[in-house]
């Protein structure tokens, strides 16, 4: 088995050696040498043009990527500013249009007082238990019209 493997390698080597000898013989011929150099020069020229076009395309993509990156940074900055404004002054007017009279009254009461708790709303609006007042106040919080603040064991709601 080992002999067969060496034999196939020898045949391959002899074949390559024969091809190499033919190429060396052709190099001695000035016309064959000139033809090979001309072909190599043309291939190199084509390759250089192709590489130049690829590089130009990459440069163009980099420019566009830089432009898009700049636009994204601007949009992020604008978005952050809008979020800051929204946190400072949320658009409450649109949500208030759909409030019941009772919820509008509670919201106006909270605005007038500055902060209210469920006990205050229970007293002012005649609820029998605190649960009803809590439910209404929590719904106003969910709508973003009031915010909660825990002070000790009490929960206060503020506009």
Image (tube, rainbow, N blue to C red):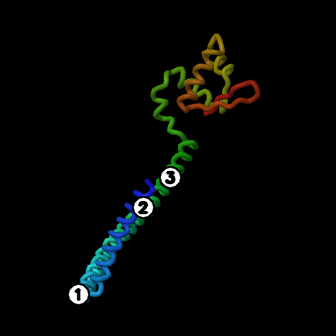
Q: Secondary structure at mark 1?
A: helix
- The local secondary structure at tag 2 comes to helix
Q: CA distance from mark 1 to mark 2?
A: 39 Å
Residue 103 quadrant: top right
CB-based contact (under 8 Å), mark 3 and mark 2: no
Report the residue at 38% width, 68% height from top.
Answer: 13
- Give x and y (percent) for residue 77: 52, 54
Q: Nearer the viewer, mark 3 or mark 2?
A: 2
Report, in whole angstroms, how far the alpha carbon at label 1 lies from the one at label 3. 67 Å
Is 87 in front, or is 2? 2
Q: Which mark is residue 6?
A: 2
Q: Residue at x 64, y 29 (%)?
A: 157
* Circle 3: element type: helix
Q: Give residue 31's mark.
A: 1
Whole-Å distance between the Cαs marked 3 and 2? 69 Å
Front: mark 1 or 2? 2
Label 1 or label 3, whichever lies nearer to me, is 1
Residue displayed at 26% across by 79% down = 39
Give me the disc on residue 104. Answer: none
**Image quadrant assignment for residue 59:** bottom left
């Amino acid at each position: 088995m080992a002999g067969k493997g060496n034999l196939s390698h020898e045949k391959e080597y002899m074949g390559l050696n024969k091809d190499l000898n033919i190429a060396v013989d052709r190099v001695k011929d000035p016309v064959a040498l000139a033809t090979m150099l001309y072909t190599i020069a043309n291939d190199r020229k084509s390759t250089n043009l192709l590489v130049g076009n690829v590089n130009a395309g990459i440069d163009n993509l980099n420019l566009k990527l830089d432009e898009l990156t700049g636009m994204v940074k601007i949009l992020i900055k604008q978005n952050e500013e809008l979020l800051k404004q929204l946190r400072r002054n949320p658009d409450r007017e649109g949500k208030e249009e759909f409030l019941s009279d009772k919820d509008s009254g509670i919201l106006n009461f909270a605005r007038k007082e500055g902060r209210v708790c469920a006990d205050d709303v229970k007293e002012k609006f005649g609820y029998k238990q605190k649960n009803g007042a809590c439910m209404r106040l929590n719904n106003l919080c969910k709508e973003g019209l009031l915010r909660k603040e825990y002070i000790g064991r009490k929960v206060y709601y503020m506009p």
